[in-house]
Image (cartoon, rainbow, N blue to C red):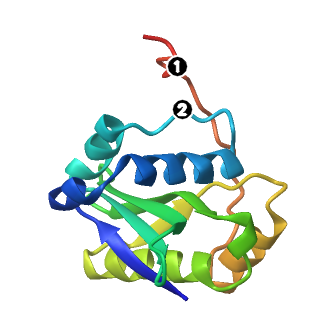
Amino acid sequence: MASIRILHPTAMHSVTDDTIVQMNELLDELNPSLARITRETLHNSIADETSLLAIAEDEDDGCILGMAMLTRSYRVNGERVGTLETVVVRRDHQRRGIAKGLVTKLLAIARQSGVSRVSLTSNDARIAAHRLYECLGFTQPKTNLFELVLRDRNRT
C-alpha cells in the first residue's frame, strides 16, 4: 500500500541520500537523459510555493514508489493555470493506482488554489499513462509544443 504526501521545504531535513537515489532511479525510468536530482535542485524545486512535489511511499518500508510535480502560474489575463510534470511510478509498482493517486492529489490542490486548467506532456510510448490521463478527464488539444533549451543542465 502507498501513502502520498507533499514534500514541503520544511521537510528537507528528512530527505536522505537514499531518498535522492530513489528519486533519480524514478527519473531513469521516465527518461534516462534527464538531469540528476541533487539535494540543492530538489530544495530549489520545492522552495517556491508555486511548485508542489507529491511523493508516493510504501507504507511498510518507506521506499519511494512514485512522484509527480504540479507547477502553478498565471497567464497575462490573470487565469491561474497548472502544469503536471514528472509523473512516474516504479515499473514493479505500476497499475496499482499509485499514479492515479498522485495526480488526483495534485489536481485537488490545484482546484483548491484556484487553478482553472492543468496541462501535461507525455511521451507517445506511454500508452497506459495516456489512458490514465484520459480517464481523469484530460484531453489532447490541437497544438504543437515548441521548446528552446537555454542552458545545458549537465554542463557546469
Query: Where residue 135 sits: x, y (%)?
Result: 69, 85
Identity of the residue furthest to the top in this view: 156
Identity of the residue furthest to the left in this view: 10
Viewer-nearest residue: 141 or 25: 25
Quadrant in the picture for residue 142: bottom right
Residue on which the image places disc 1:
154
Residue type at numbered disc 2: Ala
Against 58, is 156 above or below?
Answer: above
- 74 sits to left or right of 122: left
- 92 sits to left or right of 64: right
Residue at 29% from the left image edge and 36% from the top image edge: 40
Which secondary structure lies at badge 1? loop
Residue type at numbered disc 1: Asn
Do we see residue 30 in this rendering?
A: yes
Which quadrant holds the N terminus? bottom right
Query: Where residue 53 sits: x, y (%)?
Result: 38, 61
- Of the two numbered discs 2 and 1 on the same chain, state the one appearing first in sequence: 2
Query: Where residue 141 sits: x, y (%)?
Result: 68, 62
Do we see residue 49 in this rendering?
A: no
Q: Could you give the CA–CA distance between mark 2 and mark 1, rounded to whole angstroms? A: 6 Å
Residue on which the image places disc 2:
35
Residue at 46% from the left image edge and 84% from the top image edge: 59
Against 33, is 12 above or below?
Answer: below
Dots 2, 1 in contact, CB < 8 A: yes
Against 146, is 96 above or below?
Answer: below
Viewer-nearest residue: 119 or 130: 130
Which secondary structure lies at badge 2? loop
